[in-house]
Image (spheres, rainbow, N blue to C red):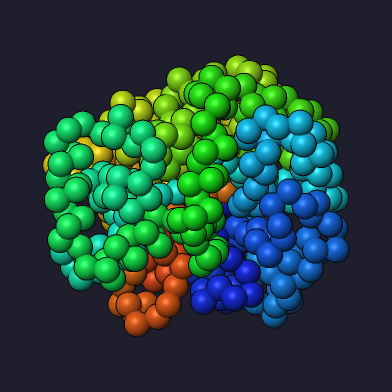
Amino acid sequence: MGMLQTMRWFGPHDPVSLMDIRQAGCTGVVTALHQLPVGDVWTIAEIEKRKGLIEADNKRYIPLHWAVVESLPVHEDIKKGRPTREVYIENYKQSLRNLAACGITTVCYNFMPVLDWSRTNLSYEMPDGSLALRFVWEDFAVFDLCILKRPGAEADYEPGVIESARAKFTQMTPERITELSNIVLLGLPGSEEAFTLSTFQGLLDEYAPINDRALRENLYYFIREVAPVAESVGINLCIHPDDPPRPLLGLPRIVSTEADLAELMAACDSTANGITFCTGSLGIRPDNDLPGMVRRFGNRIHFIHLRTTKREADPRNFHEADHLAGDVDMYAVVKAIVLEQQRRAAAGVGVTAIPMRPDHGHQMLDDLHKRTYPGYSAIGRLRGLAELRGLEMGITRSLEDRE
C-alpha cells in the first residue's frame, strides 16, 4: 500500500475547499481547530463538529476523513518550563484522549519558540512566473537589526551582513519595511494575524534565560508526560522540525538535525514519541542525510511532508523549489519511505500507509489571481502531489519487477 495522500485544510474559511482536496485525489485531510485558544482543551463536541464538516459529502462522493491533526499547539508556558505548564500539559493530555475517542490517531506538533516557520518573501517570482516562498538571511537581519532593533542582535551576524543590512534598510520604502515586518511577524499557519513589534520584543525577552539545553529539557519533560497517555489511547505524536533549522532572533532551535531527533527519540523510548518527517525543513541543511534518516528513524516516522527547498549562493538563503527539484533527492527519500512501508507490512504492523501531504506549493495559473494562505494554494500543491504520486508508483513498480 502506498502513502496515504492528504492535504492540509485550514477549515471553513480556507479558499481551498474540501471538494478541491477530494478532486486532487486525496482521501485524508490534515487540519486543526485553529479557532481555539492555544492551551484550551479540544472538546469532543468541537472535534466532532470538524469531523462532520470533513465527512459531510462522503455518501455522495469519494469519502474523506480527518487523518492527521496539524497542529495541536504546545503552549508557550510549556516551552518556557513555567510552573503553569502543568495545567496546560493536563489539558493537552485530555485533548489527546478526546481526539482518540473520535478516532483520530496522528497528532503533529512543534516546539519552536514564539514563531512557527519564518520567511522574508511570500511571493518570490520563479523563472516560470509562479510565486514561491523565500528566506533571505540579509533581509532577516534587516528586520532584526533595523526594524525590531533587538538588543544584542549584532552578536548573531557577521560584520559584512550587519553593514549590508543597514545599507539595504536605508534604501527601503516605508511600504517594503511594513511588508517585511508583517511577513516575519506572521503568526501560525492558518492565521493571517501577525504579532505587533511592541508585543513581539516582549515575547523574545521572556526567553532570555532559556538556553539551548533548557529548551531541550522542557521538550523532554513535555514528551515524557504526554507520550504515555498518547500510547495508552493509540495516538502517535510526531514533532515537526524547525523551519528554518537554525537559531533565529536569539532563540534556540532544537529540532534541526539528525542528532537533535536522535536525542529526542532517546529521551522518551516510545513509538508514540515520533517524527513528522519534513523534507523541506530538514533539507535546508546540507548535513542532514534525508534518505538515511528515513532508514534510521523509520518506525518513529508517523507523518510526512514532502517538499524541497533550493539553497542559493549564500546557503543561508533558500526558496521553495518544485517538488522534484531543489536540494532534496526526492527519489531516494520516497524510495526509503516505500521500503519502510514494506518493512512494516512484513512485520505485521497494523496500518502501514504513512500519511503524506505535498507541503507548500507555488502559486500558479488561476491561483495567481486568488487570495490564498502562503504556500497553500490548490494548484501548486496539486502539481506536487501528482508528481509525488507518480514517483511513488514508479518506485513501487520497479521494486515489484525486481522481485
Quadrant of res 152: top left
Instruction: Please name whichever residue, 211 or 130, is drawn nearer the observer in this view of the structure.
Output: 211
Q: Is residue 367 visible?
A: yes
Q: Quadrant of the C terminus?
A: top left
State the image coordinates of residue 317 (x, y, percent, origin top left).
Answer: 24, 44
Instruction: Say above or below: 376 vs 348.
Output: below
Q: Is residue 23 left or right of residue 172?
A: right
Q: Is residue 319 left or right of residue 55?
A: left
Instruction: Please name whichever residue, 39 or 100, is drawn nearer the observer in this view of the structure.
Output: 39
Instruction: Please name whichever residue, 265 or 94, is drawn nearer the observer in this view of the structure.
Output: 94
Instruction: Say above or below: 73 vs 341.
Output: below
Number of dots carrying numbers: 0
Quadrant of res 169: bottom left
State the image coordinates of residue 177 (x, y, percent, origin top left).
Answer: 29, 63
Instruction: Please name whichever residue, 159 or 68, is drawn nearer the observer in this view of the structure.
Output: 159
Q: Residue at x 59, y 76 (%)?
A: 13
Q: Residue at x 75, y 35 (%)?
A: 85
State the image coordinates of residue 59 (x, y, percent, origin top left).
Answer: 74, 76
